[in-house]
Image (cartoon, rainbow, N blue to C red):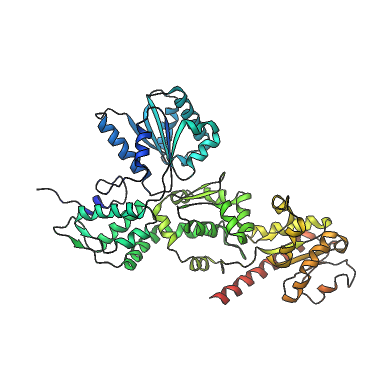
């Protein structure tokens, strides 16, 4: 009597599927590339779409065709023991076929050595050694950065998200093997976002929650609604992922008035179509976050934060060289894709995640007061508050008409203007230009002056009656600027609370 198939054998949560394997559209090209002697192969694409499974299936088929005489090793960039094996392999000859999964996890020095090895193997047309690298999006691009002439010596195969037809084929195979009828099959297809892994997970739990644990005697329908299925799965995933998500979104700590830059990069990742984003490219679309998210990129804060907890690398991967942020665990993508992000932000302590202005503050000052301006912008930026400070924008200002670039910032793109009103201010051409553009904003409570105590009365008539801060240059400057910066932080924090109340 034939043994009945078990649920976990048909809709697998991990490992290589036996009954539900579906050839992705890249299968034929991969088969030929892996069959070719010596020539290196790089396979890249989002997590969970079947790259590694497909490689193993092709290699098993090739092994069967060769009578089982193929010499194949599967190594992983995640495993420390395997990294030692990879290092030894580099100096070996005729090592057979070696597949390095999660190649992107290796350090830069080892990646460079493997890039050189690929070139050597191709030039020598070595038939006794074949190197196969499997990684996330842009894996091939990162290799070519090490050696531009490598491109024509290797095959780079990019796996795309799987089509709905492929996902349906997988689910139908599972239905046939378990003798079930998935009542939520169409919803699973749409919610899997091209991922075989997610389709397997959703189908597995649909059967589990319908108490179908083994192959049925007759075709049996599942009985769970998709809304209930999703709720069950998200509750399970929350146990694994809630804490690490909250920790990542907070950054080093929740800062008063912060624009929540770490939360936003994770939120953008959750909205991506292929489980990967380039943050620099995302900032072109999200202009209002260019300053706050840009700061954690350029100052290395995002890299430092990502490396501060090894648990982050279990669910996401960040490449500081390319600013590529990618999903490592497809289940985590499903979790963050279904998060109520506004509620998450408020739970953490961020009162709003929607911003109507590019900058919270724009500083206006004469060159003689640059040291003061720099001190203020540093204090505010350290609190993840968006500040327009000209030195931070030099690369963007280059080749632009400076007046056209600056005018909108002072006229409307900053929530508040902070003019540093010293004796030098009225005489400077650019100060006059900036003041001309923000003078109409005195009426909407958007200007917060920093008055120097030694300025003649009446020098700035427009600021009369406007709440600001008096600065005495003859007293301890840092303590005064610290106090003023605290007032500015408190002010923007209060604005966040008010805007949150209006939008709730």
Image location (x, y in percent) of residue 279: 56, 52
- The image quarter in which residue 243 lies: bottom left
Q: How many marks?
A: 0
316 over 74 or under it: above or below: below
Relative side of 427 to 51, left or right: right
Image location (x, y in percent) of residue 410: 74, 65
Q: Which of 491 and 224 lies nearest the eye of the viewer? A: 224
- The image quarter in which residue 470 lies: bottom right
Residue 341 in sight from this viewpoint: yes
Image location (x, y in percent) of residue 332: 42, 55
Name, please, the residue furthest toward the right. Answer: 456
450 over 283 or under it: above or below: below
Image location (x, y in percent) of residue 452: 84, 65
227 over 502 or under it: above or below: above
**For the point 72% across and 64% down, which residue is it?**
408
**For the point 64% across and 60% down, which residue is it?**
383
Residue 414 in sight from this viewpoint: no
Relative side of 361 to 241, left or right: right
């Amino acid at each position: 009597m034939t043994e009945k198939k078990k649920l976990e054998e048909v809709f697998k949560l991990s490992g290589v599927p036996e009954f539900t394997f579906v050839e992705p559209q890249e299968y034929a090209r991969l088969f030929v590339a892996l069959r070719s002697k010596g020539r290196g192969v790089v396979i890249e694409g989002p997590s969970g779409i079947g790259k590694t499974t497909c490689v193993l299936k092709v290699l098993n088929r090739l092994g069967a065709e060769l009578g089982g005489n193929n010499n194949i090793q599967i190594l992983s960039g995640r495993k420390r023991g395997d990294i030692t094996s990879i290092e030894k392999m580099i100096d070996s000859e005729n090592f057979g076929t070696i597949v390095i999964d999660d190649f992107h996890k290796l350090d830069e020095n080892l990646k460079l050595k493997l890039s050189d090895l690929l070139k050597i193997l191709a030039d020598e047309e070595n038939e006794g050694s074949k190197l196969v690298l499997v990684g996330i999006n842009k894996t091939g691009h990162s290799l070519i950065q090490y050696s531009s002439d490598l491109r024509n010596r290797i095959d780079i195969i990019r796996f795309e998200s799987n089509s709905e037809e492929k996902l349906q084929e997988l689910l139908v195979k599972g239905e046939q093997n378990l003798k079930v009828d998935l009542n939520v099959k169409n919803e699973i297809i749409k919610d899997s976002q091209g991922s075989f892994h997610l389709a397997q997970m959703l189908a597995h739990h649909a059967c589990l929650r319908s108490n179908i644990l083994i192959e049925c005697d007759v075709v049996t329908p599942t009985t769970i609604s998709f809304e209930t299925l999703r709720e069950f799965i998200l509750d399970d995933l929350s146990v694994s992922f809630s804490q690490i998500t909250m920790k990542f979104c907070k950054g080093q700590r929740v800062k008063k008035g912060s624009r929540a830059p770490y939360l936003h990069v994770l939120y953008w990742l959750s909205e991506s179509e292929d489980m990967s984003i380039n943050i620099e490219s995302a900032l072109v679309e999200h202009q209002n976050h260019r300053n706050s998210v840009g700061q954690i990129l350029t100052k290395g804060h995002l890299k430092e934060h990502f490396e501060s907890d090894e648990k982050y690398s279990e669910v996401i991967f960040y490449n500081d060289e390319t600013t590529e942020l990618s999903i490592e665990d497809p289940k985590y993508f499903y979790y963050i894709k279904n998060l109520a992000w506004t509620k998450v932000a408020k739970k953490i302590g961020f009162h709003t995640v929607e911003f109507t202005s590019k900058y919270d503050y724009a500083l206006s000052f004469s060159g003689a007061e640059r040291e003061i301006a720099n001190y203020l912008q540093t204090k505010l930026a350290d609190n993840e508050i968006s500040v327009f400070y000209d030195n931070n924008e030099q690369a963007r200002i280059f080749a632009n008409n400076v007046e056209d670039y600056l005018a909108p910032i002072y006229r409307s793109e900053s929530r508040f203007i902070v003019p540093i009103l010293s004796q030098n201010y009225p005489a400077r051409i650019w100060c006059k230009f900036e003041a001309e553009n923000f003078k109409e904003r005195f009426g909407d409570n958007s200007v917060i002056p920093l008055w120097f105590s030694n300025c003649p009365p009446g020098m700035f008539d427009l600021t009369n009656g406007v709440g600001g801060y008096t600065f005495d240059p003859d007293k301890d400057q840092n303590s005064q600027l610290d106090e003023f910066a605290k007032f500015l932080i408190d002010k923007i924090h209060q604005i966040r609370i008010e805007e949150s109340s209006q939008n709730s």
